[in-house]
Image: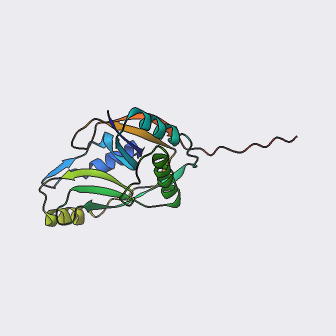
Amino acid sequence: MPRLFSGIEIPEAIGYRMSLLRTGLTGARWIDPANYHLTLRFIGDVDGGTARDFAANLGHIDIEPFQLQFDGLGSFGGKKPRALWASLRPSEPLLNLQRAHERAARLAGLPPEARNFTPHVTIARLRGTKPISVAGYLESQGGFFSEPFTVDRFVLFSSRASIGGGPYVVEAEYPLEHQPLYHSAG
């Protein structure tokens, strides 16, 4: 069974600019730019019924398109760095979308997500990288910023069991569009 997660794809032009960050850090396993994404809800390995329920629940999310923007770089792991990431500026529409994905997962019978949502795109997995090296890398890159881009859909991704970083397959697409309410005049 593939691992499932929902997310937002990163525009190709911004992904290309992010790919230029892929240098100068020992122990980094750089993520392929084709696999850059913002995870909204990780599901993991689930049975077919749960996967179908989650996918169906995602289809009921009603949020209008919105803008996102990258606003820096960071790392997870503290004294044992494990990932390097580009952060996305939090916004109310993004947080609403993520909360809707959490509700979709809960309605499908999944336990609540234990971690707080930190909007980011992983650009490298780290192994044996010293904290001082990560700090030096982050300082030398001077952050990563992008122009705003429009989020007009989210997707359901799958991945095969691996050590992370893809390849990811888009299993379903969900356009963001507000459905107007029509009232009959009679």
Residue 149 versus residue 42: which sits nearer the camera?
A: 42
Snapshot quadrant of residue 164: top left
Q: Residue at x 46, y 34 (%)?
A: 52
Residue 55 versus residue 16: which sits nearer the camera?
A: 55
Q: Residue at x 28, y 47 (%)?
A: 19
Residue 36 versus residue 117: which sits nearer the camera?
A: 117
- Spot occupied by residue 7 in the image (x, y as percentages of width and height): 41, 45
Q: Is 93 located above or below residue 152 in the figure? A: below
Q: Name the side, left or right, on which 74 lies relative to 103.
A: left
Outermost residue on the right side: it is 186
Q: Name the side, left or right, on which 169 lies relative to 186.
A: left
Q: Is 131 located above or below residue 174 in the figure? A: below
Query: How many numbered discs?
Result: 0
On-image quarter of the C terminus = top right
Q: Residue at x 45, y 45 (%)?
A: 109
- Spot occupied by residue 71 in the image (x, y as percentages of width and height): 38, 61
- Spot occupied by residue 13 in the image (x, y as percentages of width and height): 38, 45
On-image quarter of the N terminus = top left
Q: Name the side, left or right, on which 124 lies relative to 178.
A: left
Q: How is the image coloured?
A: rainbow
Residue 132 versus residue 48: which sits nearer the camera?
A: 48
